[in-house]
Amino acid sequence: IQLEVGFRPQSLEPLLLDVVPTIQQTAALALGRLASYNDDLAEAVVKGEILPQLVYSLAEQNRFYKKAAAFVLRAVAKHSPQLAQAVVDCGALDALVVSLEDFDPGVKEAAAWALDYIACHNGELSQAVVDAGAVPLLVLCIQEPELAVKRIAASALNDIAKHSPELAQTVVDAGAIAHLAQMILNPDAKLKRQVFSALSQISKHSVDLAEMVVEAEVFPAVLTSLKDPDEHVRKNATTLIREIAKHTPELSQMIVNAGGVAAVIDYLGDSRGNVRLSGIMMLGYVAAHSENLAMAVIVSKGVPQLAICLAEETEDHIRSATAWALGQIGRHSPEHARAVAMANVLPRLLAFYMDAQSSDDLQAKAKKALKSILQKCTYVPALEPLLHEAPSNILKHVICQFSKVLLHDSKARRLFVTSGGLKKVQEIKAEPGSLLQEYINSINNCFPEEICSYLCFLFALEQLSCFQTLPSNQQECF
């Protein structure tokens, strides 16, 4: 609105130099609020060449003006990497880093906010913050008694560490992990959100960094936070567990031994929507590492809970993650596949794959999970419904498994005939010489030839019956 009526930020510049300190502070606060409103106003502040004056004042003025000046820099930097770079180019980083050592906690907080908004955009800006010497001082800030300073310092470390392993290592080298780990059980929910997020961003990059977080004895303390009243604390704690579990079987085994799998499964039962995502993925990562770890998820009743998530959730990205996790559990052996199949998830996965409304990612994940599970599944009651519904590219895996089971199991052969499974196989039209035709032949070879011939005869009769019910003119067309 102000831009439309010809407002120019330069009109406030004389007030920034006023002899009355209150007027200076109010003018800076007004600039900050304008710049915070949208990126057009923030860009107008940059073009008005006011930032150098604010940066100079950070070193010269009183604490009230310093807070207001840092607020303006933060308000400009938050909108985009380009505007954050403009703040860096005007020499703000050195002045903000010096402000982190100010006696007044409010000045420290305001400076940390500005540095956080600069660092959050990309690795280059984060590296500039690191090169200015901010990280050691931010680590000191998380040791301050004021909660507000702790929160924003932890947030800034989080946004620096997230971009690359090198930046995360810089945060670690400054001793951040030990101090962050000490605050896991702090009663302040907002602080714990930032602490778990920062530890997650450090852990995600490499095995070594994840092991450093574990060595800070975050377990089993982190599991307590899965019952925290604050939803974001629970979500960020689960994300930390996920980022650690994904790296190696040894780290996943440590989480299992600490009771982490059972705790995450309980968390999934108490949650809904996006907050479930990290827990679902964590179970998938654990199960992916080895048969034993996948069995630990099964024994802890993870499969029924994932089946509930698959049924309850409506967002495709959550369904995709759940399908992926179930595939990681069921792909190891017939025992694993049976546990997944008994949860009745195969028909639902097939429905997601065949639904045109499903996203491409959900269709791909559901298809891959189905194939992974079916290639190990020998549980006939779960396979039979797919005979009647699956398309040919999935059906060949179902028929393949039947050919393996029926060859050695006489009871399964009897049930296959009485349930109509063998009759359905005779109805399948496969390309001569294809894998599907080979599997069908293998199944037929498990039974006396006269049974297969009789079922083919019944199928022909059914087709003839359908033909005879057609009107005479349609019969003539045939």
Image (cartoon, grey):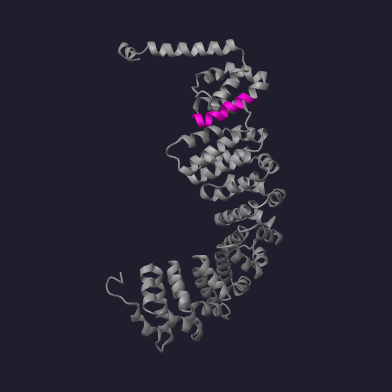
Q: Quadrant of residue 407?
A: top right
Asked if residue 267 is positioned above or below residue 16 in the image, the reply reads above
Left-right relation of 58 to 472: right
- Asked if one can make out residue 374 in the rendered structure from this viewpoint, the answer is yes
Q: Residue at x 54, y 51 (%)?
A: 275
Across and down, in percent, residue 247 comes to 65, 53
Q: Nearer the viewer, residue 19 or 240?
A: 240
Left-right relation of 175 to 91: right
Q: Quadrant of the N terminus?
A: bottom left
Q: Residue at x 55, y 49 (%)?
A: 277
Across and down, in percent, residue 427 comes to 50, 19
Q: Residue at x 69, y 52 (%)?
A: 251
Q: Quadrant of the C terminus?
A: top left
Majority secondary structure in the magenta region: helix
Across and down, in percent, residue 354 comes to 46, 34
Asked if residue 357 is positioned above or below residue 381 in the image, the reply reads below
Across and down, in percent, residue 440 comes to 56, 22
Q: Nearer the viewer, residue 284 or 154?
A: 284
How many numbered markers are drawn? 0
Left-right relation of 441 to 291: left
Q: Residue at x 62, y 31 (%)?
A: 377
In reply to whether residue 65 is colored magenta, the answer given is no
Q: Which span of residues is magenta-colored? A: 390-404
Left-right relation of 218 to 5: right
Q: Residue furthest bottom?
A: 19
Q: Residue furthest front?
A: 433
Q: Nearer the viewer, residue 14 or 169?
A: 169
Asked if residue 209 is positioned above or below residue 418 in the image, the reply reads below
Q: Quadrant of residue 414?
A: top right
- Asked if one can make out residue 227 in the rendered structure from this viewpoint, the answer is no
Q: Nearer the viewer, residue 288 or 181?
A: 288
In reply to whether residue 400 is colored magenta, the answer given is yes
